[in-house]
Structure formats: structure tokens, C-alpha cells
């Protein structure tokens, strides 16, 4: 019996050859199609970057000169591409002194993961198209709508108005310390409500811009994973709303250089991990909440240039801030004495500013316990008595301001042994006697 010339259902070698040829053509077409598609996507990235360059009208360092047709855009300065697809994954152009606006076509860089454009002079509104960058991980400018955003920063620019309203809508889980009102919109920060779904958001920085209006109450609904929150250097006003006490993981909070008024919200005392707090240069008033130092981690506290009041704040409020290194409560309405017990138990202090208040009594000899102190300012108070000899024990003291008080007696001669002193002002007191020779050249 004749055996048919078949193999897996095919009847002839010529048929197999034809099928192999068809498969080869299909494969070549497929590779060609993929290559063309990849090239098209790369071209999309290149055109988006060129449009970004076009909107920069001042590039004093010539950073964008390399952005031309002589080399692949992955070789341009500030551009990082992925090794697999050669798609743009990072735009890093910090501190380049650019002036201009941000092109909405940056929203076409769909593989983007890291954007660092801080400390330039961008202005105008932030394009809504930035909400399309769903792969973004770190933002140091307003590009949002990422399923894993952990940092949002628009610091150091001149943005105003609302940020994109689609910020955070698809988020299932996830360095600015006189005032004039230029932005009076009450809705500038209303976009914050759209961030409440960013459950992994750890840093939010909106500092040094032109945002105006009030702090929205929606802040209270933020993720308790928030570690750092900065809105300093804007034109915000009204009271500081309750809700910050919900941020149990917050360790840095900057609300300085705004026009906030009223009292400090009582729930500030519920922040167990707070390390740095800036409320300076506002119009806040009333007494400091006694629970502010319930958290012993606080080492940086600036309440200066406000209208706070109260007696013996060092003993009554700040005593429990056991790890303070920087404290500035100058330019307020505090009264009472400079507590010897406070000085004795806070030897970690490096900066202590008490100027332009109404402190009375003498400067206790316990000031010599501040062995790490570099800056000490008690000027423009109502302090009396002698300048304590123990002040010379502060061997790291660089700047000492004691002017405009009622100190009397002579200048301690051992102050002349403080070789670290750079600035010394004892003027407008009732001091007598000679000026120690080594201090005669200090200013």
C-alpha cells in the first residue's frame, strides 16, 4: 500500500515551503511594524521636549543648546531614557534659571517617572494635561495623577490659580523657610480636596509661589502618611483649620511668610512625630497651646514675627520640648522671665531668639549651661541686672545681641576670651566701665 507523502496534515514539501515563506513575511512585517511604532513613540517624546524648549524664553546657562537635531534626544542635557524602549523617564533641570511657561505637551511623555524642575522662574497656570502622567513617582513641579505619587512639589516658582483638577482622581492607594497681597482668590488651594485619595502621599510642597485665599478644611482628610507639608512664602490668609492633628506621621510643617491670623489650632499638640514647625511671619495671636510640646521630638520651632502673648512661655509651654535646638519666639508680646530651669535643662540649644518681647528680670547665670549655643538674641526687652560671667562658658557663641535692655554694671572681662564671637551688640543699656580690649573691634 502506498504511503501518502504527508506530514502533520501537509501533503507536500512545496506546500511547507510556501507556508514557511508566508510566516517569514509576516514576521518581518510584524518586526517592521513594531520598529515603526517604537520610532513613532520616540518621535512623540522628541516633539514634546522641543515644545518644552520653545516655551523657555530665557536660558542664561545655555542648558538647552544641546536640544537639537545633531544627536538623539536621549543624549540631551537633563534627559534620561529607559534602556529598553528608549522612552523619556526623567527630566532633571534643577536650578537652571529658566524663565517661561511649561508646555502642556509635557503631558505626552507617557513613560515619565521623575520630574525635577524646581528653583526656576516658571510662571502662568499649570497645564491640565500633566494629569496624564500615570507612571510618575516623584514630582518637583505640578505633574500629577499618578497611582504611586509620593512627592508633590511646586516650590520656588510663581504659579498662581488652581492646580489641575484631575490631581489624584485615579490614585487608588498611593528645601524655603514683607508680605503683600497679590492673589486674593479664595479657591487657590481647593485642588487639595482632589489629593485625599493619594493614600501614600508623603511630601506636599507648595511654598514660595503666589497662592492666595484660605487653607481649605479638606486638609483634615489628607492621608495620615504625610511626612512633610510646606506652604510657606505665599499669600494665604484666614485661620489655620483644625485637622493637622490627624497627620500622626507629620514631622515637618512650614506655614511661614503668609497672613494667617487667629490662634494656633489646639490639635497641633497631637503630632507625636513633629520635628520642625515654622509659623513665623504671620499675624497669629493668642496664647500658645500648652500641649505643643507634648511631642518630645520637636527640635526646630519658629514662632517669630506674630502677635502671640502669654507669660513665662519657657516654663509653661516650651519646657517639655526637651530636644530643642532652634527656638525663635522674637517679635511677639510674650512676658515673664527667662527661666533658669529652662536654660539648665536645654543644653542642646544652638539658636535662641527672644528679642522684641517684654521679658523682665535678670539673665540668670544658668545661661552658661548652653554650651552648644551659637546665636543668642535677647535684645529689645526689659531685662535688668548684670551680664552674667557664665555667659563666657558658651564657648561656641558666634552672635550675641543684648542691646536695648536695662543691663548694668561692667562688661564681663572673660567675654574677651570668646574667640568665636563674630557679632556682639550691647548698646543702649546702662553699662559702665571699660570695654574689654579684645571686644573693642567687635560690631
Image (tube, grey):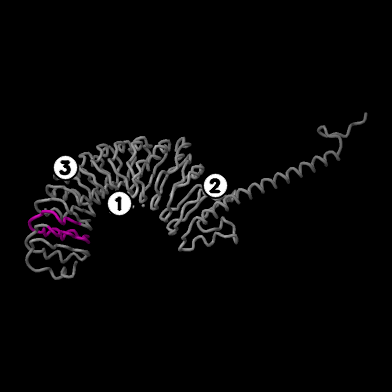
- Residue 138 visible in the shown view: no
Picture layout, residue 134 above or below residue 406:
above
The residue at the far top in this view is: 1
Picture layout, residue 96 above or below residue 83:
below
CB under 8 Å between discs 1 and 2: no
Q: Quadrant of residue 273?
A: top left
Query: What segment carries the magenta color?
Result: 376-404
Front residue of 337 and 188: 188
- Residue 312 visible in the shown view: yes
User: Disc 1 designates what residue?
Assistant: 180
Q: In which quarter of the image is residue 185?
A: top left
User: Disc 2 designates what residue?
Assistant: 108
Provide residue 151's location: percent of width, then percent of height.
Answer: 42, 45
Nearer to us: label 3 or label 2: 2
Q: What element carries label 2?
A: helix
Compute the Cα span from label 1 to label 2.
37 Å
User: Disc 3 designates what residue?
Assistant: 316
- Of callouts 1 and 2, the N-terminal one: 2
Front residue of 291 and 236: 236
- Of callouts 3 and 2, the N-terminal one: 2
Provide residue 62's location: percent of width, then percent of height.
Answer: 49, 63
| Residue 10 - label | none
Amino acid at each position: 500500500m502506498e504511503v501518502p507523502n504527508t506530514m502533520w496534515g501537509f501533503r507536500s514539501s512545496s506546500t511547507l515551503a510556501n507556508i514557511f515563506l508566508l510566516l517569514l513575511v509576516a514576521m518581518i512585517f510584524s518586526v517592521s511594524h513594531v520598529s515603526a511604532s517604537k520610532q513613532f513613540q520616540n518621535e512623540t517624546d522628541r516633539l514634546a521636549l522641543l515644545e518644552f524648549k520653545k516655551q523657555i524664553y530665557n536660558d542664561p546657562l545655555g542648558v538647552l543648546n544641546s536640544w537639537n537635531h545633531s544627536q538623539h534626544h536621549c543624549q540631551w542635557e537633563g534627559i534620561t531614557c529607559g534602556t529598553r524602549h528608549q522612552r523619556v523617564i526623567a527630566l532633571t533641570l534643577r536650578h537652571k534659571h529658566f524663565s517661561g511657561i511649561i508646555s502642556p505637551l509635557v503631558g505626552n511623555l507617557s513613560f515619565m517617572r521623575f520630574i525635577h524642575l524646581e528653583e526656576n522662574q516658571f510662571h502662568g497656570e499649570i497645564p491640565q494635561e500633566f494629569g496624564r502622567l500615570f507612571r510618575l513617582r516623584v514630582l518637583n513641579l505640578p505633574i500629577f495623577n499618578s497611582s504611586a505619587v509620593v512627592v508633590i512639589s511646586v516650590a520656588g516658582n510663581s504659579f498662581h490659580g488652581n492646580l489641575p483638577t484631575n490631581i489624584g482622581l485615579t490614585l487608588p492607594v498611593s528645601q524655603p523657610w514683607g508680605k503683600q497681597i497679590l492673589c486674593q482668590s479664595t479657591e487657590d488651594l481647593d485642588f487639595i480636596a482632589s489629593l485625599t485619595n493619594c493614600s501614600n502621599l508623603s511630601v506636599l510642597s507648595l511654598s514660595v509661589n503666589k497662592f492666595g485665599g484660605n487653607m481649605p478644611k479638606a486638609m483634615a482628610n489628607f492621608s495620615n502618611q504625610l511626612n512633610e507639608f510646606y506652604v510657606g512664602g505665599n499669600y494665604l490668609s484666614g485661620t489655620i483649620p483644625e485637622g493637622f492633628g490627624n497627620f500622626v506621621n507629620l514631622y515637618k510643617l512650614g506655614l511661614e511668610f503668609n497672613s494667617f491670623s487667629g490662634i494656633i489650632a489646639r490639635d497641633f499638640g497631637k503630632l507625636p512625630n513633629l520635628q520642625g514647625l515654622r509659623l513665623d511671619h504671620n499675624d497669629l495671636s493668642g496664647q500658645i497651646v500648652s500641649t505643643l510640646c507634648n511631642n518630645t521630638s520637636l527640635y526646630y520651632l519658629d514662632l517669630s514675627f506674630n502677635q502671640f502673648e502669654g507669660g513665662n512661655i519657657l516654663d509653661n509651654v516650651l519646657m517639655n520640648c526637651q530636644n530643642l535646638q532652634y527656638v525663635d519666639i522674637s517679635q511677639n508680646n510674650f512676658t515673664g522671665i527667662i527661666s533658669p530651669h529652662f536654660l539648665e535643662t536645654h543644653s542642646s540649644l544652638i539658636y535662641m531668639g527672644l528679642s522684641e518681647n517684654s521679658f523682665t528680670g535678670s539673665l540668670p547665670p544658668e545661661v552658661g549651661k548652653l554650651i552648644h549655643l551659637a546665636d543668642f538674641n535677647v535684645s529689645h526687652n526689659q531685662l535688668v541686672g548684670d551680664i552674667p560671667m557664665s555667659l563666657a562658658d558658651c564657648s561656641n557663641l558666634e552672635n550675641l545681641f543684648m542691646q536695648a535692655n536695662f543691663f548694668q554694671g561692667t562688661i564681663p572681662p572673660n567675654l574677651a576670651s570668646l574667640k568665636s564671637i563674630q557679632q556682639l551688640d550691647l548698646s543702649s543699656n546702662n553699662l559702665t566701665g571699660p570695654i574689654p580690649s579684645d571686644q573693642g573691634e567687635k560690631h
